[in-house]
Image (cartoon, grey):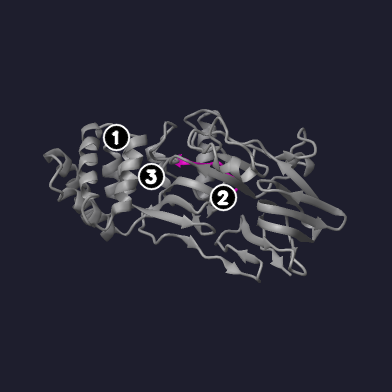
Amino acid sequence: MIRQIHNSARTYAWGSKTLIPNLLGEESSNQPVAEIWFGTHDGSPSVLTQNKEILLSEELSGHKLSFLLKLLAADEPLSIQAHPNAEQAKEGFARENQLGIALDAPERNYKDDQPKPEMIVALSDEFHALCGFRDISESLQLLELLSGAPLGDVDFKARVNSWIEALRNEGLAECYRKIMGSAGQLHDFSKEFVLVAEALLQTKNNYPESLRTALTLNEKYPSDVGVFVSLIMNHVVLNKGQALFLPAGNIHAYMGGLAVEIMAASDNVLRGGLTPKHVDLIELERVLDFRSVDVPYVHPVALNNWASDYPVPEADFALLKLEINPEESSQTLKIPGEAIALCVSGQITVISGDDSVILAPGQAAYINEPAKSVTLVGQGSVFLASDQDCQAQ
């Protein structure tokens, strides 16, 4: 079975008025377009394109997909955040239910009882993100650069030195707590930071991107603790087609660009700054992974000359990128479970038996197990999200 599916865009404030409309071949929007969800999650369930009164989950007799696929477009930074693992999600969801916190309450942390590992693949030429705590030695060098700058008053240097001492003597978790414990106390510090960082950008140093990022964040969220947490995080610029995998506990924030995002079907987000939304620092700290990590790039593996796999250590989802070319004699996939095909360029026809769907950029189709295999014809690019690894023939 193949069904074309549809969903309305979500207009969060951090979205872009141009990136998703341009992909869809539409004029710029009057309001920011942030995400389009493809799946069965109750937060924004997909409907059938031919009959928008029917939810995809209704067509599937109430069945829910284990994964959620999204188009994401950001012109402004998203909140600094992390997601729980399976055990934390179950415990947190049950606890908040027992406390009687409504699912739609602004102070609710856990919207469901599922973990939310995720992967992001850049569609724009550049996609900027903060991802994981950087190497302690690098964070020390950057903080010492700030502390040793000619500018900056005594109070500024004292606060930065307290972060340095915590990081050097007690590690990332204590440094993070020191920074987060400064919430509401950073008005004057923030002004000094701007002067120091702008002066340092006029000199040769190893951290211009980190300084520029923090200055940009401070313009949007002046004096927010998230600005200064960014100083101990990895700053990543993905080129088109590059990807990051964000496991449970990974601290991150998307900064800007257009991307495809795939995740376990959950909406559990613990926020820690750069947002007007609810921030629960105690709960966030419970789920954070305080290890220094290398940037968690996902390296595509070519299955043949038209299909590439983005391998991740998760059972909830798998993702392929398919380059469909009319010169290829056969471009067929075995679908062992269920999948969603999302076209991001060109025009693609998805065929299985007597069923077929034509997809333009931004359009998607659900494919389930009885299809067994699908053939794709036309010219363009497709991401195929599934609950199991697919095989290219």
Residue 339 visible in the shown view: no
The vertical placement of 84 against 327, above or below, is: above
Q: Which residues are magenta?
A: 264-270
Splitting the image into 4 quarters, where does residue 171 fall? bottom left
Q: Disc 2 versus disc 3: distance between alpha carbons?
A: 25 Å
Which residue is at 66% across, 67% downward? 306
Q: Which residue is mark 3?
A: 285
Quick check: 344 left or right of 358? Answer: left
Compared with 346, 217 (above or below) is above
**Circle 1/circle 3 CB separation < 8 Å:** no
| First along the sequence among labels 2 and 1 | 1
Within-10-Å neighbours for mark 1: few <14, some 14–19, many 20+: many
| Secondary structure state at the residue bearing disc 3 | helix
Q: Which residue is mark 1?
A: 223
Can residue 157 be seen? yes
Q: Is residue 267 magenta?
A: yes
Dot 2 falls on a residue whose secondary structure is strand
Disc number for residue 33: none
Quadrant location of the C terminus? bottom right
Q: Horizontal and vertical percent for residue 392? A: 71, 67
Amino acid type, label 1: Ser
Task: Give the percent coordinates (x, y) of residue 11.
Answer: 56, 33
